[in-house]
Amino acid sequence: MSLLAKRELRSSVRAILHSLDEQSLAYQSERVCEKVLQHPKFAEASIVSVYLSMKGRELDTTCLIKWILRTKKENTDKNKRLFIPLILPATYSTERRSFMRMVELKSEEDWLSLRENSWGIKEPSLDDLDSRTSLENILASGSDNCLMLVPGVAFGLDGSRLGHGRGYYDRYLRDNCSHSENFYSIGLALHEQIVEDIPMNANDVILNEVIVT
């Protein structure tokens, strides 16, 4: 029943998002980004993981990425390391299924050079994998404050989340972040993505917080 309820909720929220005008999407994205930049967990974090947005289907994180990369370039005391998702194919996994890793984005030039994948999301090339720092290794040490900004189709204000159906973020959070006291997760939501009841099962991870306009 949970799978059917998830499928129906995804369908209904996606229909609403497809009808959302660009002006409202841009306005809400800017307001939420401002809230993130003023958040104490953002100030504390030396590492920030940010998703790269699907156009018109989720809150746009471009302004956050630009801010982090600009302060990194200026080498200010607000400097933070930035990590972004990379989906690895099943051939890279002993479980024979695709999975997500977080890899470091080095500069604005690095960001602009990324190519879009089949989902229309920019991500690093697999050819660059060996040259990029992996967030998993840093999380294992537990020594750095890390903030992860999480996408989704729908959210509850209690931290519940409905993803796109592949389970990438739930598996990542469960496998890499549940043991770390210095880790904090925030879902970024458009107003249209907030619902009262998110169908959840034992594999779904509750976020620490959800930010919405």
Image: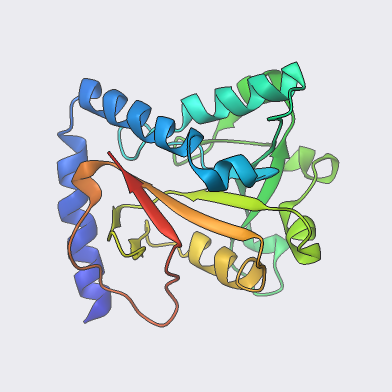
Seen at 33% across and 61% down, the residue is: 162
Seen at 42% across and 30% down, the residue is: 34
Relative placement, left or right, of 81 versus 98 is right
Seen at 57% across and 24% down, the residue is: 67
Who is closer to the viewer here, 170 or 119? Answer: 170
In the picture shown, does residue 51 fall above or below 166?
Answer: above
x and y percentages locating residue 46 in the rendered image: 70, 43
Say how many tags the image has.
0
Who is closer to the viewer here, 109 or 96? Answer: 109
Give the residue at the far right of this rendering: 131
Colour approach in the figure: rainbow
- The answer to which quarter of the image holds residue 160 is bottom left
x and y percentages locating residue 55 in the rendered image: 36, 31
In the picture shown, does residue 192 fall above or below 139?
Answer: above
Q: Is residue 54 visible?
A: no
Who is closer to the viewer here, 154 or 39? Answer: 39
x and y percentages locating residue 72 in the rendered image: 72, 25
x and y percentages locating residue 10 in the rendered image: 24, 57
In the picture shown, does residue 2 fall above or below 177?
Answer: below
Seen at 51% across and 30% down, the residue is: 64
Q: Is residue 11 visible?
A: yes
Q: Quadrant of the C terminus?
A: top left
- The answer to which quarter of the image holds residue 110 is top right
In the picture shown, does residue 65 fall above or below 51?
Answer: above
Q: Quadrant of the N terminus?
A: bottom left
Relative placement, left or right, of 213 versus 116 is left
